[in-house]
Image (spheres, rainbow, N blue to C red):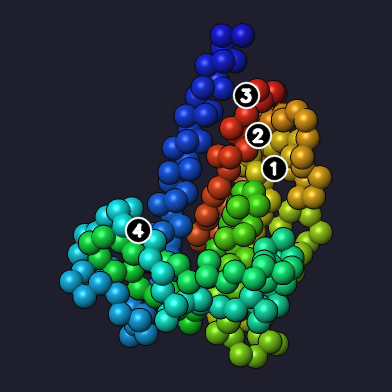
Amino acid sequence: MAKQQLLMLGIRASFHTLSAVLVAGVIFTAVFLSRNVLPKEHPQSDSAPNVEDGRECNLFEGKWVFDNESNPIYKEEECKFMSDQLACEKFGRKDSSYKFWRWQPRTCNLPRFNGTKLLESLRNKRMVYVGDSLNRGQWVSMVCMASSVITNPKLMHMHNNGSNLITFKSLEYNATIEFYWAPLLVESNSDDPTNHRLPERIVRIQSIEKHARHWTESDIIVLNSYLWWRMPHIKTL
């Protein structure tokens, strides 16, 4: 029993760390993929340097600011890949102000997202979001932002293999942005993308190969899992 308790403490500590890495990864991924962007359409902090200037900047110190000039980056009704689960306006939400907020670091300016630069950075590459519905939501947003700059619908497509993997591909750039459902990363009884709300959570703590084989060949991975570990008891095998 003591050994199992120590194991669970280690798991929780590891995934608290993972959550912090995830947040850092999402921000740095956006910065990396959007470097050398086109001139900004909306002025930011005049006194702060731009991230792409190469100067050090703490991206985690800042605030959310309302920006209705350069946001939103895409329109929900124009994204053919929008999920009903995330389609707020489609199902009657009247308040649209949530679309105009962006993160403003205190000591620097982030480049505005640029879909063309993103796809160019992902040319002949594979980017995979792995995790739960939170990561799926981020994946949908990324796909909507990227697809918004593709004017020919024949140059992009979505493929669902009928299980855990969904793939968006830009044919012109040979770039893929995928989502893989694995809410605990390791094998578990919640691996079904549809039926995963179960009274007891069971994991094979040493078994990650079942899922990892789907993302080991990727160039960029965005992981999210920690919320699924925040339970009083998890049965491990």
On the image, the x and y values in percent for residue 226 come to 55, 39
Please tell me the numbered disc located at residue 207.
Answer: 2
Q: To which residue does mark 1 refer?
A: 210
The answer to whether marks 1 and 4 mark residues whose Cβ atoms lie closer than 8 Å is no
Which one is in front, 164 or 92? 92
**What number of labels is visible?**
4
Q: Quadrant of residue 70?
A: bottom left
Task: For marks 3 and 1, give the CA distance.
Answer: 26 Å
Q: Name the residue: 81% across, 45% down.
A: 195
Q: Is the Cβ of the residue at disc 3 closer than 8 Å to that at disc 2? A: no
Residue located at (77% from left, 40% from top): 197
Q: Which residue is mark 4?
A: 63
Q: Nearer the viewer, residue 171 or 35?
A: 35
Quadrant of the frame with the N terminus: top right
Residue 57 seen in this snapshot: yes
Residue 49, label in figure:
none
Question: Is 70 on the left-hand or right-hand side of 167?
Answer: left
Check the picture and name the quadrant holding the C terminus.
top right
Q: Give the percent coordinates (x, y) of residue 105.
A: 30, 61
Tell me if residue 126 can be seen.
no
Other-residue count near label 1 (Cα within 10 Å), few / some / many at <14 / 14–19 / ≥20:
few
